[in-house]
Image: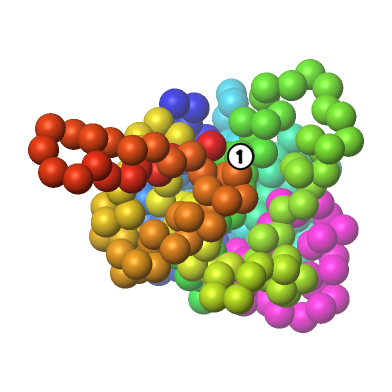
Amino acid sequence: MTMYRVLIIEDDFRVADINRQFIDQADGFAVVGICHTASEALVFLEQQEVLPDLVLLDAYIPDVKGLELLWELRRRFRTLDIVMVTAAKEVETIQEALRGGVFDYLIKPIESSRMMQMLKRFRDERVLMGRHTELDQSVLDRALIRNEYSQVEGSRLPKGIDPLTLERVKGGLDARVAQTASSLAQQTGVSRSTARRYLEFLVAQGEVKAELDYGEVGRPERRYSLG
């Protein structure tokens, strides 16, 4: 499995540790450093033979103003993917960050499910790009439509399908190991009936594969894996 390296830039030690715990829970990701100031972060990056794949960046860093560090990272380390993890809700700040090409913008306090959704999307896009030397328009469109939590996307879901719960269920699935609705329910904290309903919706959408496991005794079980 490819391991994606993550740098956390956060002046609040408690929040930095929470973010580290989120990353530690995600398959395929590892925290390679935690920096609490801009100067510390720039020194850390200059010393790396291989740059991190992803940076979690707070907007409020004590030794810089505003989003100066974002633009400095863009200037000096162009290949970095950056996610803002910040309490800054001002539209002006958000717009500037988006102009700076951030991969995502997470507003504190961060829910684990939202962090996991971002990490999964990051991993999926890296895998997609790694499989191709060129992309046609349809594949590129799928890669660029990234905000699964938007009101527009959520409104297109059928009645009874919540986008947050849907992402939680999808996040618990694996392409390599097929799971039952019961095991996925236990893993994600939803009821068995909810897990089955969302899994069948994903099967209908072509995002999940279902197969029957006859086992040794008893009724066959339906198992699900990412398509």
Q: Residue at x 53, y 37 (%)?
A: 227
Q: Is residue 167 above or below residue 160?
A: above
The reply to whether residue 76 is visible in this rendering is no
Return the residue nearer the eye: 78 or 141. Answer: 141
Left/right of residue 77 with respect to residue 225 in the rendered view: right
Q: Position of residue 81 (x, y in %)?
A: 69, 44
Left/right of residue 206 with respect to residue 111 in the rendered view: right
The reply to whether residue 182 is visible in this rendering is yes
Does dot 1 land on a helix, a strand or a loop?
helix
Q: Position of residue 118 (x, y in %)?
A: 58, 54
Q: Quadrant of the N terminus?
A: top left
Q: Within 10 angstroms of label 1, few (less than 14), some, or many (20 or more) residues?
A: few
Which residue lies most toward the top here? 133
Q: Is residue 50 above or below residue 175?
A: above
Q: Which residues are magenta?
A: 85-108
Left/right of residue 208 with respect to residue 126 in the rendered view: left
Residue at image mark 1: 124
Residue type beneath disc 1? Asp
Q: Residue at x 49, y 27 (%)?
A: 2
Q: Is residue 103 magenta?
A: yes
Q: Is residue 83 magenta?
A: no
Return the residue nearer the eye: 171 or 181. Answer: 181
Return the residue nearer the eye: 74 or 111. Answer: 111
Quarter where residue 70 is shown:
bottom right
Q: Position of residue 161 (x, y in %)?
A: 55, 70
Which residue lies most toward the front here? 219
Number of dots carrying numbers: 1
Return the residue nearer the eye: 44 or 98. Answer: 98
Q: Is residue 204 above or below residue 213?
A: below
